[in-house]
Amino acid sequence: MYIIKLDAIDSTNTYLKTLSLKKMPKDFTVVIADEQTNGRGQMGTKWQGEASKNLTFSVFKDVSFLKVPEQFYISMAVALGITKALKELRVPKIKIKWPNDILSENKKIAGILIENVIKNNKLEGSIIGVGLNVNQKFFDNLPNASSLHLLKTKFFIICLNILKAI
C-alpha cells in the first residue's frame, strides 16, 4: 500500500484522477486528507465535512480483471467491506442504501464515490472515495446525517485500519 497524506486538498478522488491521467497509480495507492475543500458525492453533490473530524480518503484499485458491465461489483465489494468494518466497531444498525450510502440508525454516516478509469473500452482501474463521519457534531441543512461520535456518544480515534476492510 502506498499512502499519500495531505493536510488539505479539493478532493482526494480528483487528486487520484489527475494522477491516473499521467500514469496509472500503483495498486492500492491511498490518498487521505485532513480536510477536503470540495469533496464530491454522486451526481454532483458535495460532501460536507469539518477539517480533522472525519475520515476522507480515496484508493486506487487495479480492476483490469473485470469487464466494463461488471463494474457494479466494485460498489458491492466496497459497501460490504465498509459495513463489515463498522459492524466490527459495534456501530449500531448498519445498512447500505445502494449504491453509495452507509447508514446507522437510518442516518447517513458515510458516502462512497467510485469513478472508474476506462480506456479503449476496458476497465483499467477504479478510484474509490470514502467519506466517513467520525467526530463531526454539526451538519448544516443535513437532517439525516450523523457521525460515529453522535451515534455512540464517545470520541472515536480516526485510524487507517478501516482501509483493511476494503
Image (cartoon, rainbow, N blue to C red):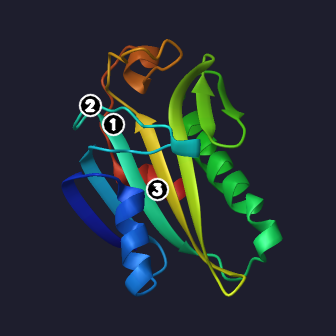
User: As shown in the figure, which amino acid type bears the numbered disc 2?
Assistant: Glu
Cα distance, mark 3 to mark 2? 21 Å
N-terminal of the two: label 3 or label 2? 2
Q: Is residue 166 visible?
A: no
Looking at the image, residue 111 lies above or below residue 119:
above
What is the x, y in percent for residue 24?
46, 84
Cα distance, mark 3 to mark 1? 14 Å
- Mark seen at residue 163: 3
Looking at the rendered structure, the secondary structure element under dot 1 is strand
Q: Tell me the residue at 46%/64% (across/down).
A: 59
- Give the class, few, some or many, for how many residues have Cα within 10 Å of label 2's Cα (few <14, many ≥20): some
- Give the class, few, some or many, for how many residues have Cα within 10 Å of label 3's Cα (few <14, many ≥20): some
Do the numbered discs 1 and 2 sit on residues whose CB atoms are within 8 Å?
yes
Q: Tell me the residue at 48%/70% (across/down).
A: 60
Query: Disc 1 or disc 2, which is closer to the eye?
Result: 2
N-terminal of the two: label 3 or label 1? 1
Looking at the image, residue 127 lies above or below residue 163:
below
Tell me the quarter of the image containing the N terminus: bottom left
- Mark seen at residue 54: 1
What is the x, y in percent for residue 22?
38, 85
Q: Which residue is mark 2?
A: 50
Which image quadrant for residue 100?
top right
